[in-house]
Image (cartoon, helix red, strand yellow):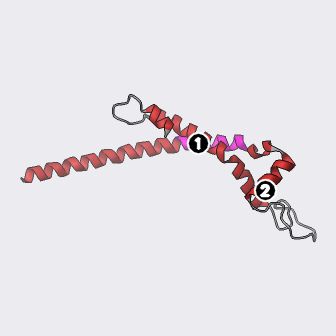
Amino acid sequence: ETLSARALQGNANCTKTPTQAMLIGAASGAVACLSTMPLDVIKTRIMTEDVAGRSAGVVPRGGTKTRKYVGVAQSARRIWVEEGPRVFMRGAVPRLLYKIPSSAVFLVAYEVVSAFLAQMRNKRKEMQHKETTHVL
């Protein structure tokens, strides 16, 4: 919203150009992606672990049925201690390469459709106004 507000400063009709929407969408996508990366790493670790505490796809050999990752806070501590903080950004580049363009396209599409619907709503109001004034 801050980016949108700054982009619209001095804009009399308060609408974003498609280029502004694309840049704002891309920046928002990057911020959202980077800010959720640690939780995404934790979620992936929890989801891909089997009941023997190993990565998915590895067949356990009669071990105990304990989990390595139990809950978000415990998993975060364990990953931090065993692998270091840099692990929380593992996979950031491919994720950014996906999220930045998709967020840019999404916001442009949203702004275009939103402007179209607002234009249609205004035309409908004008037609209704003409009909009511014509009847009187």
- The reply to whether the magenta stretch includes residue 97 is yes
* Residue 11 vertical position relative to residue 67 in the rendered view, above or below: above
Give the amino acid at mark 2. Answer: Ser
Judging depth in this view, the residue of 9 and 47 nearest the camera is: 9
Judging depth in this view, the residue of 66 and 99 nearest the camera is: 66
Please give left or right for residue 121 compared with residue 53 in the image: left
Q: Which residues are magenta?
A: 91-104
Kindly identify which residue carries mark 2.
Answer: 75
- The reply to whether the magenta stretch includes residue 111 is no
| Residue 72, percent from left and from top | 73, 58
Kindly identify which residue carries mark 1.
Answer: 29
* Overall secondary structure of the magenta section: helix
Question: Which label belongs to residue 107?
Answer: none
Task: Estimate how packed mark 1 is, as few (under 14), some (14 to 19) or many (20 or more) residues with alpha carbons within 10 Å.
Answer: many
Alpha carbon separation for disc pair 1 and 2: 26 Å
Please give left or right for residue 42 compared with residue 127 in the image: right
| Residue 20, percent from left and from top | 47, 33
| Residue 75, percent from left and from top | 78, 56
Please give left or right for residue 94 compared with residue 24 in the image: right
What residue occupies the far top of the structure in this picture? 10
Task: Estimate how packed mark 2 is, as few (under 14), some (14 to 19) or many (20 or more) residues with alpha carbons within 10 Å.
Answer: some
